[in-house]
Image (cartoon, rainbow, N blue to C red):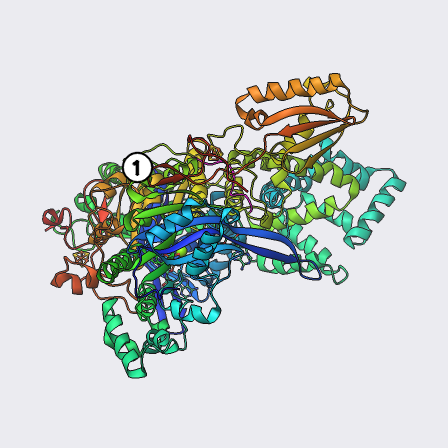
Amino acid sequence: MEPILVVRGLKTEFLTSRGLLRAVDDVDLQIRKGEVLGLVGESGSGKTVTALSIMYLLQQPPGRIAGGEIWFRGLNLLAGSDEDIRVVPRTVGPPKFLPADDLLKQHRARMNRVRGHGMSMIFQEPMSSLNPVLRVGYQVAEVLMFQRRQEICDRLLSRRDLTDADLGLFRQAVASGEASERERLVAEFCVRSGLRPEKIHALIDASGLPIDERIARVRRLAVRRRRGGGWWLRFLKRLDAMEEIHFTREWERLSRLSLGQPAVDLFDPKKNPRAKGLPPLATVSPQPDALRLYFHAAVGSGGDRRKGDLLVPSEDLRARVEAHLRDSASGVFGAIFGIVKSVGITEDAIELRYREPATDLFRTETELWSRRLLYRIATSIPVLRSVLARPIEEEARRHVVELFRLVRIPEPTKIYDEYPHELSGGMQQRVMIAMALAGEPALMIADEPTTALDVTTQAQILWLLKDLRTRIDSAILYITHDLAVIAELSDRVAVMYAGKIVEAAPVADLFANPLHPYTQGLLQSIVSTESQGLEPGAPLPTIPGVVPDLLAPPSGCRFHPRCKFAFDRCRVEEPKLLAHGPNRRVACHLYPEEGASAAA
Amino acid sequence: MPPPSKDRNEILLAARGLKKHFAVKGGLLQRAIATVHAVDGVDLVIRRGETVALVGESGCGKTTLGRLLLRLIEPTEGDVLFNVPEDVFERMRANGPAATQDDGQTKELIRQYSITRRRRRSMKALRRFMQPVFQDPFTSLDPRMLVKDIVAEPLLVSGLATRPEAYEQGARLLEEVGLRPEHLYRFPHEFSGGQRQRIAIARALAPEPEFLLLDEPTSALDVSVQAQILNLLKDIQRKQNLTYLLITHNLSVVRHMADRVAVMYLGRILERKRTAELFSNPLHPYTKALLSAVPVPDPKRRRERIILPGDVPSPIAPPAGCRFHTRCNAVLPHCGWSPRDIAATAAHMFDPSRNPDASELPPLEEVTIRGDEVLLLRYREPATESNRLGVEALVKARAERPEGIAFRAIQYVRLDGGRILLEFLPAKEPELLEIVPHHFVACYLYPGVTSATN
Ligand SMILES: Nc1ncnc2c1ncn2[C@@H]1O[C@H](COP(=O)(O)OP(=O)(O)OP(=O)(O)O)[C@@H](O)[C@H]1O
Ligand SMILES: Nc1ncnc2c1ncn2[C@@H]1O[C@H](COP(=O)(O)OP(=O)(O)OP(=O)(O)O)[C@@H](O)[C@H]1O
Ligand code: SF4
Ligand code: SF4
Ligand SMILES: [Mg+2]
Ligand SMILES: [Mg+2]
């Protein structure tokens, strides 16, 4: 199954008063469609920071993502963040990668969209993410209405649609109504919005123009508005931030640009043993709709070729590149190159041609805000409000009640009107799950959602999540320190220790045969209500020592001071997370690198 | 009063009809507006050298009970007995659980052994025998004190040792709990959670107590550190013949540590039994659900789960009768159904405008709850005998249905001055009784369980 989220080499740091703390260090993760990946580790191992990095919700500063890639449905989410790398192709030698600060703002806007629709997060403390003064149902409805409003505004903004039956009223009243009736409506509108009548016409007329022009007009309008309107001011601030943001395609193009580095890796025989049979990659050159790969001729193979010569691609090479891509599709590279539609050939290069961009997911903030503005203006007219807003609100309410039923909230219509503090912890957590589901996310990240709950309530929530899995097809990244919960819920497990993934395996394999000494120790030291060969009261096997201080992590393998198998190499050389068998990975020197002998 | 250290009697601590009610204050004048029944009639025996575990969900009163046993707070009712000879205890027990039935002689015995009736001053001498260890090693140690002072403090305060003696003892204790002497000259914040819990244990051990109250000692710790602390506690217990009351919500820890378990729910003990048997053969429906809810760290094992509906009710108004009846999957008609449980349904069910089956009845005006046994239906016109029969038929029909269990508790449907009155079986709480030897259960499912008297 294709991965929907691939995290590669993620590094997240905090600048603390005592120094630079690397909370997440070179973390690789993969989540496939519809799968539950359990991320387990002790307190301070970096689980929450990993989740926050993926959602781009880190508090920065003191935090910052210092490196790595987060690929979500074939797009690099970190492209455009502070650490984005811009590919500078060169004809000879590997391409250069430069940070591109100017992309940051675009990245932020994109993350807002991804967070609404692609990914959602459930936190340990539901109370901290619910607004205490709003009714819970309304809070979930907000998430839904946000989307519906845009649809309505789309129609408002496009002039042709103003003749639609449900928008007829607007057109009638403002554009071609009876003079007196029109005056009345416009007057009322002016009082409410604070705009002068001619501005309203400017706004309506703006709807046929290109988006930039519309922004400019709305902006001019707003600037001249009298002072003091709370949301207008906020709107203006947003507008300033937005104007530097351009269009979807632009972002997509940029995020495709950063495909350069993975491509270099993909064809590097050191990083990907499968690439051995192919000629060496000379350079990559990103194009708006494709990535061009230039190859060197293998040295000395054909009489007059000199070192560094570029290879003229043949159909045979094209086929081999295509096959190589297909072969690598199962692993990390699968998601990354998921956006490649076909492999073509030009006179001097092989071309990885992109699929059409997924425009639905990434719209510009600008559009979004102009829509919101229009919606507000429109719904501040009572007549329009009843026509436009009421139906969406009612629809949203119905939808929320449905969602509440989905998460098995008893009496959903009653709970809808309650405030967060009136609900028990378990019920609050259900509301959070409903909210997370509202955007129909492809990935839900749940950070210890049951740790603060009682066992019987935890059982309810775990049962609910399992039950939901059969009815929706979101993948779940489930974070916990409780191995028993992992055993219960997840398909695969990644074990984290001191900021690193030390082992990743299918759940049954991990429990039956843990490879990493830390995993082994952890599994032995847990007590269970069911006997597992251990007499009650007998001394428990323990891991000696304590979790290391991340400000000064131990050299070599971070587990070596506590590991009973540690040997010399462990103290100096850091083990890499390497494949061990078809679907397991482990970072420990006890396990020889696979294919190491073949590579030699 | 026998000095506790001399005769080392079998029963170290016993709770007898122990209650603690907290007033909830509110309003402008901060008057008591409600009562939290935190601990509501608990009997518990802790024998010397054993580990008794107290389990239950958050808010069920575990910590409150623990604090009562150490007399860190005063009980509202009932006694804590200390160091009672087995035969004396038997004599007290023979008189029944409730203080109302005590004769003069028993009263005298209780006064003799009760620590809750002692003067505060004479309590002081007893304190050293009972020491608490709390959940959060981050807040339970004074951050401004050096470890050596933290550990020596209880000895100095109770005047058990001179300063040099106390420090020497402190160094020895630190070693005992697996820390090194150089740790004496550090502050608590320089230690990890597990190490801090070790310090807290060392401090508790300083006055050579006989009893440790362990209130969630490992809940704040990591799994790998939890195992270290559990081993340490077992080890010390073996060496010093200590008695533990282990308070926890983690059933896995209970199974590993305890000899006997008491399961608490809303301020009362529902089941009490030896650990191994409780895990292999739980009898109370709540214990069964609790045990089945614990996730097992083995992906191959898929076991039957009992998912309890709803949440734990508020201890401000615990349900009538059996406190667990609102969530129990095995309820009987006499488990304590009261008008509260059906009031919402009744407003719908007996209203002709909302329920077509009730179309014979006049329009429903009002539904009122009177006490724990009576529900009143007032109709727009005075009800007649035929109306009464109609309501009775509706009740009967509902009682037949599987979810109509609450309606089976309706004993009579009467006519009362134009109103219709539904009378419930009296709600009585099941008593904690010895169903099989050494196995106490409070549930009507088991023969021999009568209702609690009071
Ligand atoms: N805002 C911050 N400033 C400084 N350090 C931080 C910050 N947030 C997290 N850290 C550090 O990052 C490390 C990883 O923390 P993280 O919260 O990810 O742990 P965790 O695995 O989620 O642990 P837990 O199980 O306790 O939630 C810790 O050492 C923590 O001290
Ligand atoms: N000082 C107090 N004043 C008022 N109510 C109190 C007080 N102490 C405890 N309570 C209430 O008494 C009930 C029992 O509390 P207690 O702390 O004993 O529960 P617990 O079983 O230890 O729970 P937890 O597992 O959360 O520690 C709770 O409803 C609590 O809110
Ligand atoms: S690399 Fe060495 S120290 Fe680290 S876990 Fe493996 S054997 Fe232990
Ligand atoms: S008495 Fe027993 S059967 Fe009845 S509600 Fe209580 S636990 Fe359930
Ligand atoms: Mg965390
Ligand atoms: Mg407590």
Q: Residue at x 14, y 53 (%)?
A: A590
The residue indicated by pointer 1 is B280
- Residue B166 place in picture, x, y as percent: 30, 78
- A474 or B221, which is in the foreground? B221
Q: Is residue B452 magenta?
A: no
Say if residue A227 shows up in the picture.
Answer: yes
Q: Residue at x 66, y 20 (%)?
A: B392
- B391 or A197, which is in the foreground? B391
Start and end of the magenta stretch? B307-314
Which image quarter: residue A27? bottom left
Q: Is residue A506 left or right of residue A218?
A: left
- Residue B430 place in picture, x, y as percent: 49, 37
Q: Chain of mark 1?
A: B
Give the vertical position of A457 relative to B426 (above or below): below
- The residue most toward the front is B105
- Residue A191 place in picture, x, y as percent: 82, 52
Q: Is residue B388 left or right of residue B427?
A: right
- Residue B152 place in picture, x, y as percent: 33, 76
Prevalent SS, magenta region: loop
The amino acid type of the residue labelled 1 equals Ser
- A486 or B208, which is in the foreground? B208
Which image quarter: residue B123? bottom left
